[in-house]
């Protein structure tokens, strides 16, 4: 398998991100998605993956209150592959960067706690 949407449809092998019960996820405001994402912009140039806060900080754009969507699936969100992280958003900025650079159709969210991360990971492809 590969995840680059230029060559392949990897979403065929995974559940859609909408299959994940969002009550088991943190809201975007509770995660590292809301930290300054200037370096993400500098590396990727992905303005559409960011939002400007009133204080002038660039933060990750949030879809559905819980998810960040990669550019390769934003126009067709049903093609986004769910990626779940834990804590405050373990490796969230790095995952966002990889999704953009390698054209991976990822929808990234953070689980409420470790138990949710384990259970959701076991329940979904």
Image: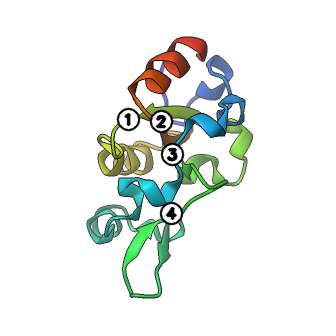
Between tags 4 and 1, which lies in front?
1
Element assignment for label 1 = loop
CA gap, disc 1 and disc 3: 9 Å
Q: Which residue is mark 1?
A: 86
* Residue under the point 45% across and 25% down: 117
When the figure is inspected, residue 69 is found, relative to residue 56, above or below; the finding is above
Q: Are marks 2 and 1 in contact (CB under 8 Å)?
A: yes
Of 77 and 120, nearer the camera is: 120
Question: Which mark is on residue 26?
Answer: 3
Local packing at callout 3 (Cα closer than 10 Å; few below 14, some 14-19, many 20+) is: many
Looking at marks 1 and 3 on the same chain, the residue that comes earlier in the sequence is marked by 3
Looking at marks 2 and 4 on the same chain, the residue that comes earlier in the sequence is marked by 4
Looking at marks 2 and 3 on the same chain, the residue that comes earlier in the sequence is marked by 3
Q: Which residue is mark 2?
A: 111
As drawn, which residue projects farthest toward the top? 122
Is 81 placed left or right of 54 in the picture? right
CA gap, disc 3 and disc 4: 19 Å
Local packing at callout 4 (Cα closer than 10 Å; few below 14, some 14-19, many 20+) is: many
Element assignment for label 3 = loop
Of 41 and 28, nearer the camera is: 28
Is 30 placed left or right of 79 in the picture? left
Looking at marks 3 and 4 on the same chain, the residue that comes earlier in the sequence is marked by 3
Looking at marks 2 and 1 on the same chain, the residue that comes earlier in the sequence is marked by 1
Q: Give x and y (percent) for residue 68.
A: 53, 52
Local packing at callout 1 (Cα closer than 10 Å; few below 14, some 14-19, many 20+) is: many
Q: Which residue is mark 4?
A: 49
Whether residue 115 is visible to the viewer of this picture, yes or no, is yes
Local packing at callout 2 (Cα closer than 10 Å; few below 14, some 14-19, many 20+) is: many
Q: Give x and y (percent) for residue 15.
A: 66, 23
Element assignment for label 2 = loop
* Residue under the point 47% across and 37% down: 112
């Amino acid at each position: 398998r590969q995840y680059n949407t230029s060559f392949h449809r990897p979403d065929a092998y995974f559940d859609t991100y909408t299959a994940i019960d969002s009550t088991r996820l943190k809201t975007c405001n509770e995660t590292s998605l809301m930290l300054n994402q200037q370096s993400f912009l500098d590396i990727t140039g992905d303005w559409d993956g960011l939002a400007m806060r009133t204080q002038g900080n660039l933060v990750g754009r949030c879809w559905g209150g819980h998810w960040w969507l990669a550019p390769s699936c934003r126009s067709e969100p049903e093609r986004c592959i769910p990626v779940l992280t834990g804590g405050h958003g373990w490796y969230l900025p790095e995952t966002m960067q990889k999704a953009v650079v390698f054209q991976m159709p990822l929808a990234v969210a953070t689980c409420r706690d470790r138990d949710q991360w384990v259970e959701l990971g076991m329940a979904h492809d």
